[in-house]
Image (cartoon, coloured by chain):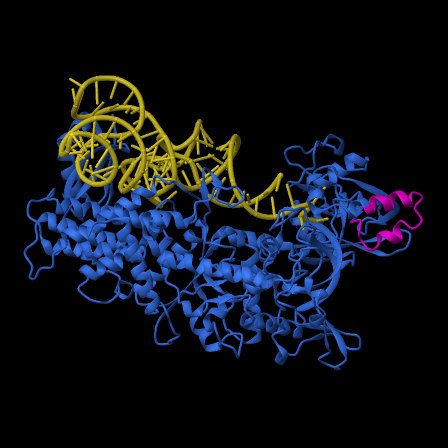
RNA sequence: GGGCAAGUGGUGGAAUGGCAUACACGAAGGACUUAAAAUCCUUUGGCCGUCAGGCUGUGAGGGUUCGACUCCCUCCUUGCCCACCA
């Protein structure tokens, strides 16, 4: 048979069917076998799979298949993150309902995944919109409620006017909605939160244990959690004596505080401006700032607006009376919502002070500019220096003073050292239909009552008409809303908000361990066997959102005693984006390449090989429709080798140099491919290594190296190529293995090839000779020579002699079995 | 404004202290063919040279080293993340 697309299609369909019929990748927890759990971030089912999915899942599949061949019991499941707003939008657009639309997308997606030949245990397939799944969302929510971790509070929240729903802080990217990119507004609402802040310390500390996570993901999470040590300093309102705490990380600058600024929504503001002569003016300023969206505030940039309240505060360290202002650049969400302003040493304060002609005083002398005065400053000096104008602390290095001043203030009740976190509680209620109903009932007598576990799941009503106009459609469904109070039996109202879909995806990796268990959230033994996930693979865009939430849920399950580990994902790989003409492939840009069209032209194997070969997995990948030809050509050469040059024989014959060289190349390649994948996911160089071996086999088979061909060596080499390629291009390799493997066993269940160190060794090697660091020649020498013998051979080399004529050898540097460098002078 | 990553042929990329450009794409020339496609062979960083070979070369500049794409410092450019976080 020749290598044609029709033949490839036939082979790929044949093996996809065989894997499916035989449930080739179905696994069970068996404690006597070593396990390996490979997981990719499950897709949102929005239609067909795209190139990003292909890349993500191909990487995972190679790892899964390699581990299988290495004898591990490999769990490699797949499911769908199926709740969420796009389904509602699509339902409106296509005049259908979200469930119908979603299930149809799932079917399309599953077919796309099947066509790629991924090694999933399809018996564990889950979709979060199934009530068998969201039942357990509700159960988890109840457990959190029991422990006070799920609670409802009124607060200013992020509100996306276009999605008409609330958003978590993590879903606001640069002031915009992560999904629709519209500006996010602030709104006062009563909403459900999860107390992720209770876990801030643990979430931060345990990042240290994640040795095999990309450093930048760790850094992003650290910054997001944002632990900062500082001092809460007790200023006093002069007139009333009320305490006004401000937070600072720079206690060393306390003597330079020349005014105090409050956020416009600070609780004290109303009182402070009560008797102000320009009260009306101040109030209208407050209104204006309150109505600004976050992104407006940021884009307003350096211009800082504010007003004087007419009141003064007393600085506890020197009893100085300084004015109290309100301004747009101080945020109620962080610290105490009030700051001491030190314009000489904080750029924001500096700009504000210039704008409003407020006084300044230098308290940290810039060592490069020790005599400058506040009037000389063109900008705030934020660097280190020596304390000045700071009473008894004068002369201290400011780094030291931070600590000393904090202790002194604490001792004198002027303040206390404090810890502030940037992390906020997670807002999880959404005013949308297509999500998990929050299992809570509101009763006039009993208040907020959780739905009892035995009444779960609270089912999401179906065939609901969605308008997309304000609020959850659930609120208008009388049958849903009106219920009996589980506690007193009187008539009561159901909660009509649904859960954010990030709730669903925060624990799905545990559900895969017991995918269809209807009695419990997951089985303890099964989770104990499979978890944690050994290798997790997905996009960097989830560096904070999903990966932080999942870590939080895992810590919560540990507290419940359901699991015994602290972190869900041992190793994390974040794959790069797929680009076309330098831009990210996306539907909105219209620059997508449909995997299906590539498959019908070249087959899934070529697509898989190309996407792994074109770039390292963490880098961006530029789609090049020419370059894919190279992958096709390579596979056809492998095919021809197996078809035309593999001939079973019996017995063996002595080896020539050319035979030994090929055999050595075979072992080198096994070593390289195994290490490239395992040590750094270097699929691109692993593949290039196999290409090198194929090139060598072709030369050998064509008689380029020697006129005599040793068929046994040739056969071994071809077999090795097919085995090494099996994780990358599984369909082709299954087919070739059937022809040359000499067994009926699937290649997926065949042992990964081994290499022998002694075959890698060479009797003679080439030593690179440098003179003063420049390449000047090469010498054939026996391996493992000592310095003196090596020196003898190298210095006897004719060419080297030429270079050394009339010079003195000053040093002779040897890198064993590799290189010598002769340092010469005149 | 802060943080992180990256910068290597015409292109994707390889080499992480020791032969710069593996592997592939593209291009050029050749073989086969009536012709084309496919396939195979050869060449392919730049400059000089008929060859042998020489010089030069990894964003720019400096440093460390016998030796630097690799380590350190300064700068430039690009990408990503965070951002009035006190």
Q: In this view, does A552 lie to the left or right of A396?
A: left
Residue A192 screen position, x and y as percent: 69, 64
Q: In this view, does A70 lie above or below A55?
A: below
Residue A412 visible to the viewer: yes
Furthest residue toward bottom: A488
Q: Can residue A536 be seen in this view?
A: no
**Colour chain B appears in:** yellow
Which quadrant would residue A820 be assigned to in this image?
top left
The answer to whether A494 appears left or right of A781 in the picture is: right
Q: Relative to residue A563, is residue A807 drawn left or right?
A: left
Q: Which range of residues does the magenta coloring cover?
A: A263-287
Which percent across, then down, holds residue A636? 24, 48
Residue A432 located within the stretch drawn in magenta: no
Task: Name the one closer to the observer, A169 or A405.
Answer: A169
Q: Which chain is blue?
A: A
Is A17 situated above or below B42?
below
The spot of residue A128 in percent (x, y) is 54, 66
Q: Viewer-proximal residue, A193 or A739? A: A739
- Looking at the picture, tell me which residue is in the foreground, A233 or A430: A430
Image quadrant of residue A778? top left
């Amino acid at each position: 048979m020749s290598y044609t697309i029709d033949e490839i299609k036939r082979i790929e369909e044949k093996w996809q069917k065989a894997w499916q019929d035989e449930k080739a990748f179905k696994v069970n927890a068996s404690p006597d076998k070593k396990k390996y759990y490979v997981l990719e971030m499950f897709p949102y089912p929005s239609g067909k799979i795209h190139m990003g999915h292909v890349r993500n899942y191909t990487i995972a599949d190679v790892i899964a298949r390699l581990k299988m061949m290495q004898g591990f019991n490999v769990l490699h499941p797949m499911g769908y993150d199926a709740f969420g707003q796009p389904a509602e939008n699509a339902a409106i657009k296509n005049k259908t309902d979200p469930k119908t639309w979603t299930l149809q997308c799932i079917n399309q997606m599953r077919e796309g995944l099947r066509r790629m030949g991924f090694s999933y245990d399809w018996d564990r397939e889950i979709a979060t919109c199934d009530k068998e799944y969201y039942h357990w969302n509700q159960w988890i929510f109840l457990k959190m409620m029991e422990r006070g971790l799920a609670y409802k509070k009124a607060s200013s929240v992020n509100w996306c006017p276009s999605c008409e729903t609330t958003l978590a802080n993590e879903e606001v990217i640069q002031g915009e909605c992560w999904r629709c990119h519209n500006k996010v507004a602030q709104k006062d609402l009563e909403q459900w939160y999860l107390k992720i802040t209770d876990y801030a310390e643990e979430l931060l500390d345990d990042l240290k244990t994640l040795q095999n996570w990309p450093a930048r993901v760790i850094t992003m999470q650290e910054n997001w959690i944002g632990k900062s040590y500082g001092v809460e300093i007790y200023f006093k309102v002069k007139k009333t004596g009320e305490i006004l705490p401000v937070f600072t990380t720079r206690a060393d600058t306390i003597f330079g505080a020349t005014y105090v600024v409050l956020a416009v929504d600070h609780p004290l503001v109303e009182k402070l401006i009560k008797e102000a002569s320009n009260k009306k003016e101040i109030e209208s300023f407050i209104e204006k700032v309150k109505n600004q969206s976050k992104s407006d505030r940021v884009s307003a940039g350096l211009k800082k607006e504010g007003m004087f309240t007419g009141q003064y505060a007393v600085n506890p360290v020197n009893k100085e009376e300084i004015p109290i202002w309100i301004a747009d650049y101080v945020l109620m969400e962080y610290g105490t919502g009030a700051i001491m302003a030190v314009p000489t040493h904080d750029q924001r304060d500096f700009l504000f002070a210039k704008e409003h002609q407020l006084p300044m005083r230098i308290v940290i002398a810039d060592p490069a500019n020790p005599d400058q005065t506040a009037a000389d400053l063109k900008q705030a000096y934020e660097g280190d220096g020596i304390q000045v104008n700071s009473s008894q602390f004068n002369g201290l290095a400011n780094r030291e003073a931070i600590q000393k001043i904090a202790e002194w203030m604490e001792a004198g009740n002027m303040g206390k050292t404090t810890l502030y976190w940037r992390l906020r509680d997670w807002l999880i209620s959404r005013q949308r239909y297509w999500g998990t109903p929050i299992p809570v009932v509101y009763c006039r007598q009993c208040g907020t009552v959780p739905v009892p576990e035995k009444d779960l799941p609270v089912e999401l009503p179906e065939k609901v008409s969605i308008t997309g106009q304000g609020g959850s459609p659930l609120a208008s469904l009388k049958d849903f809303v009106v219920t009996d109070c589980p506690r007193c039996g009187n008539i009561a109202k159901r909660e009509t908000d649904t859960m954010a879909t990030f709730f669903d995806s925060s624990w799905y990796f545990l559900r895969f361990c017991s995918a269809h268990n209807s009695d419990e959230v997951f089985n303890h033994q099964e989770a104990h066997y499979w978890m944690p996930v050994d290798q997790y693979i997905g996009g960097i865009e989830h560096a904070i959102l999903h990966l932080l939430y999942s870590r939080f849920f895992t810590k919560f399950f540990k507290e419940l005693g359901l699991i015994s580990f602290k972190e869900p994902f041992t190793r994390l790989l974040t794959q790069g984006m797929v680009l076309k003409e330098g831009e990210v492939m996306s539907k909105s840009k219209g620059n997508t390449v449909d995997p299906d069209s590539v498959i019908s032209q070249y087959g899934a194997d070529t697509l898989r090989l190309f996407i792994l070969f074109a770039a390292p997995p963490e880098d961006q990948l530029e789609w090049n429709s020419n370059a894919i030809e190279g992958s096709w050509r390579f596979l056809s050469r492998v095919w021809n080798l197996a078809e035309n040059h593999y001939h079973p024989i019996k017995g063996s014959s002595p080896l020539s140099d050319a035979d030994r060289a090929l055999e050595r190349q075979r072992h080198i390649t096994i070593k390289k491919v195994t290490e490239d994948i395992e040590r750094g996911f270097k699929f691109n160089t692993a593949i290039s290594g196999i290409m090198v071996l194929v090139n060598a086999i072709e030369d050998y088979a064509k008689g380029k190296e020697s006129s005599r061909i040793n068929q046994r060596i040739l056969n071994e080499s071809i077999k090795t190529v097919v085995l090494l390629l099996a994780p990358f291009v599984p369909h082709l390799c299954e087919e070739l293995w059937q022809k040359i493997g000499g067994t009926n066993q699937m290649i997926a269940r065949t042992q990964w090839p081994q290499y022998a160190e002694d075959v890698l060794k060479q009797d003679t090697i080439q030593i690179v000779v440098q003179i003063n660091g420049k390449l000047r020649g090469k010498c054939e020498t026996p391996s493992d020579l000592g310095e003196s013998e090596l020196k003898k051979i190298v210095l006897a080399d004719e060419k080297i002699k030429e270079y050394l004529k009339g010079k003195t050898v000053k040093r002779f540097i040897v890198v064993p079995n590799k290189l010598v460098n002769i340092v010469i002078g005149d």
